[in-house]
Image (cartoon, rainbow, N blue to C red):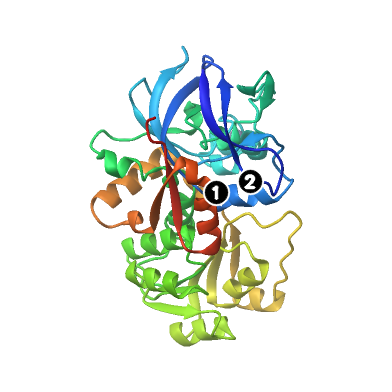
Amino acid sequence: MKVKAAVLHAPQTPLSIETLELEDPRDDEILVRLVATGVCHTDISMLARPFPVQQPIVLGHEGAGMVEAVGRGVTKVKAGDRVVMSYNACGHCASCLSHAPSYCHDFAAANFVGLRADGSAALSREGAPVRHNFFGQSSFATHSLCTEANVVKVPDSVPDGVFELLGPLGCGIQTGAGAVINVLQPKMGQSLVVFGTGAVGLAGIMAARAIGVGTLVAVDRVPQRLALARELGATHTIDASRIADVPAEVRRITRHGADFSLDTTAVAAVTRQALDALGPLGMCGFVGGAPVGTELVVDVRDMMLKGKTLRGIVEGDANPDVFIPALIEMQAQGRFPFEKLVRLYPFEQIEQAIADSKSGQTVKPILRFLDD
Ligand SMILES: [Zn+2]
Ligand SMILES: [Zn+2]
């Protein structure tokens, strides 16, 4: 079938919206007609770097849409179901079998290569293959092929106006919320400091408020985002462009240092601050795609004497089939208002959405596919 997709032909070139040919779903595949897709920072970093994806490729990995057809072996969803697509995993390695699919032994192959496991491409242009299977979905397109491994059915009770906002639950939002709820697991009244108040950081702040964290500090350099962080539950904010020693400021606010910190910036110097801001037995989690080879210098003696933990986190350790419906329910109850992060754009304005995300003007862009 013919589909419309935003194609990346080379790093640091604009995306080009083109008509491509998409194969019919194989036995294990699910054809989804996209209703909307989020733009994640990982998409944006793929635009700039020659690694790890190869071009031409269709990016996008926060898709929400309607199932149009399923292969003969698919039982999880059926035509007409509304779904969110999340990250991909092999389903049979030790991590996948231990319910930790975001640490799948084949995570890179399943999410970044852009081909099916057998090396074939379902997407092509005039007979030439176009890579598609980005995070098992390549959602910057009117249609996508995914599998049971990364599709989550959305409850029928969700109104359409909310449904079109759900794509980012598949990556950015579950990453921030999951880092707090699944990994750091602060108890009621403990303190947490979040570095970076983009979509991931703000999702972490909303999750922290929902589970009763005490002192909740947001750190960023953009005043509007800090104001939003406060609206969403931060008890204190630190403008890092005005405060020279952020860890000292966190220690001042929390008295002995934070119980937990979360760095969402993927900047090693900030991760170091997140570690330095901890008190005794504190735990620092960090997320985000730092460039390959990025190194982090830590104060070994301080880490040892204070019993600190540093933990890398992928996709918030979330099992999407369990975690995404839980976030949907919390949003419906008004306890996880991620709709406040969102700005909608028509799919054709994808370049504008990316520019607004990079400039900080939009926290979470969502592209809508309008019927033509
Ligand atoms: Zn696996
Ligand atoms: Zn992402």
Q: Determine whether the residue tagged by mark 1 lies in a helix, strand or loop.
A: helix
Q: Quadrant of the image for the C terminus?
A: top left
Q: Determine whether the residue tagged by mark 2 lies in a helix, strand or loop.
A: loop
Q: Which of the two residues, 320 or 199, is positioned nearer the viewer here?
A: 199
Q: Extreme front residue here?
A: 372
**Residue 263: x, y in percent?**
55, 65
Which mark is drawn over residue 351? 1
**Residue 341: x, y in percent?**
39, 58
| Above-or-below relation of 163 to 30 | below
x 64%, y 65%: residue: 267
**Residue 113: x, y in percent?**
68, 34
User: Is residue 307 visible to us here?
Assistant: no
* Crowd class of label 2 (few under 14; some 14 to 19; many from 20; radius 10 Å): some
x 66%, y 20%: residue: 126
User: Is residue 372 visible to us here?
Assistant: yes
The answer to whether 77 appears left or right of 54 in the picture is left
Alpha-carbon distance for marks 1 and 2? 7 Å
